Image (tube, rainbow, N blue to C red):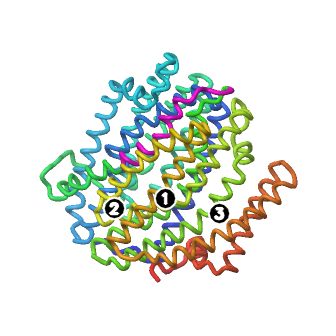
Amino acid sequence: MIAPLPPQRLAHAATLLAGATVGSRVLGLIREVVVAAMFGASDARAAFVIGYYVPFFVQRLLIGGTLSIVLIPTISDAIARGDESEMRQVTSRLFTLVLAFGVGMVVVGQLAAPALVRLAAPGFIGDPVQLARTVALTRVNFLAMFFLALATFATAYLQALRRFTAPAVAPLAFNVTVIAGTVLLGPRMGITGLAVAWVAGTAIQFLVQAPALHAAGFRYRAEFDWSHPAIRTVRRLALPAMLGLAIVEINAYVGRFFASLLPVATGVNAVAALDYAYEMVQAPVGILAISVATVLFPGMSQLAAAGDRVALRQTTSLGLRSLLFLTAPVSLGLAVFARPLVQMVFERGEFGPSATGVVAACLTAYAAGLVPVAAYYVVARTFYSLKNMRTPVVVGAAMVFLNAVLAYAFMRVMGVAGIALASAVVAFANVGLLLWMLARDLGPLDARRIVGTAGRVLVAAAVAVWVGWVVAQQRADLLFLLAGVGAAAFVYLAACVLLRVEELTLVRGLLRRRSVRLVP
């Protein structure tokens, strides 16, 4: 039986994940810089965006996110009963299912690619060259989905056993492989070289976790028992989890759907511009929100299994307040510094000033919704720990409709930036409704404490960003931009000390890898 993770180990795990995620996001940013310099915001780049996200959506729907959501609570139940033999049987049978689905995704993807591309990007249908290029890239990227499915299984299995090192390193290996592959293959194969590099990266992402799987006791036996009690539990949870993820992925894809309908202006494809901005705003989400939620989720599952709803509420509140402290200044900073940041990161090679303006406008709009996007990761996992998959699905379905209506309305006025703004508005509506429903079912979530934290960090963030902007405006160069960002960070921390923001103590503890109080 695996004992609950003590606070000092939780702090260590959170620091490890955050550090690895920072490294992965930095490498991911370098990857995007390389891609931007080689392909800009061109039609070729837009074709790759659709050609990747179509198979990624299918993979997430069938295996990726569904598996991680379902596997961790299932293993936690086995751990709670002290039955490690059953856990081995369940995971071995699940791996057989993953293998079957992985092969099936590759085969179906090759056949269905033309229809899927027409459905995902109807704006490409009028351009036969763009349509054919997107279909070809989609078929290549479906090969990556097989390896990504295996990598996702490995990550979920190891995280359920509180082994975070190999899953944290895997994305680093992925990004290094993609960067190297793009540099080597891009000049020879064009945008197809980028797709081949992604396939190689996903293969490496699984292979680097394979030794840790073996060390953790995973032994695969080619068998499958659909009637096994744990498998029946997985079957019961998988469909609502799959529907929930379908809603999330469809919601994320609404923007690209409408962007494909916009005309190409001054050589800037709206799909490509939206994707660059999305990748920039997802970096802090990955570094901050996913790290916090990933570490909290196994503990949440054990608290829910034990019926300790008080501790579960307090853990959820702590996660939300921590993310408010971490993401509020980033949200304001990205909005204010959007243009110089995009210029510094991307404007070189095929990525020109016209692309900078469009991407910066999208980034500003996306940044407005950063806080609720981050909060969603904690709120959703609270529902999942309670094995309540239905509520996020129902709420998410309503958000898809709202997102489509707002995206269409806003893009008619603001162009592609309106699509990003619609996403931000929907993020607030989504997490607000989920919080209300969670408090109704689980009990009070320290609303007064959360609101108090929000007020203090927003004041601190506003002062910090203003100071950073004043410093950065002294001269339009990289040195003063970095100085402005540094000044903003220093002022924010100082203001949080003066305003007695208690979450600062938690983050300081995580950074120093010392014990922190998870529940007050």
Asked if residue 406 is among those painted magenta in the image, a careful observer would answer no
Q: Which amino acid does label 2 sit on?
A: Tyr
386 or 447, nearer to the observer:
447
Q: Distance between the residues labelled 1 and 2?
A: 15 Å
Q: Name the residue under label 1.
A: 290
Residue 212: name its quadrant.
bottom left
Q: Is the magenta stretch mostly helix, strand or loop?
A: helix
Q: Position of residue 391 (x, y in %)?
A: 32, 59
Earlier-in-chain disc, 1 versus 2: 1
113 or 356, nearer to the observer:
356
Q: Position of residue 412 (x, y in %)?
A: 57, 36
Q: Give the range drawn in magenta.
A: 245-266
Residue 349: name its quadrant.
top right
Q: Mark 2 points at which residue?
A: 384
Residue 463, above or below 110:
below
Residue 207 at least partly seen? no
Residue 235, above or below 386:
above
Q: Where is residue 58 in the image (x, y as percent from the top left)?
A: 36, 39
Residue 299: name its quadrant.
bottom left
Residue 123 at least partly seen? yes
The residue at the point 73 percent across, 62 percent down is 465
Q: Which amino acid does label 3 sit on?
A: Pro
Q: Where is residue 441 in the image (x, y as percent from the top left)?
A: 32, 70
Q: Callout 2 environment at 10 Å: few (<14), some (14 to 19), or many (20+)?
A: many
Residue 484, above or below 438:
above
Q: Mark 3 points at which residue?
A: 329
Earlier-in-chain disc, 3 versus 2: 3
The residue at the point 52 percent across, 63 percent down is 16
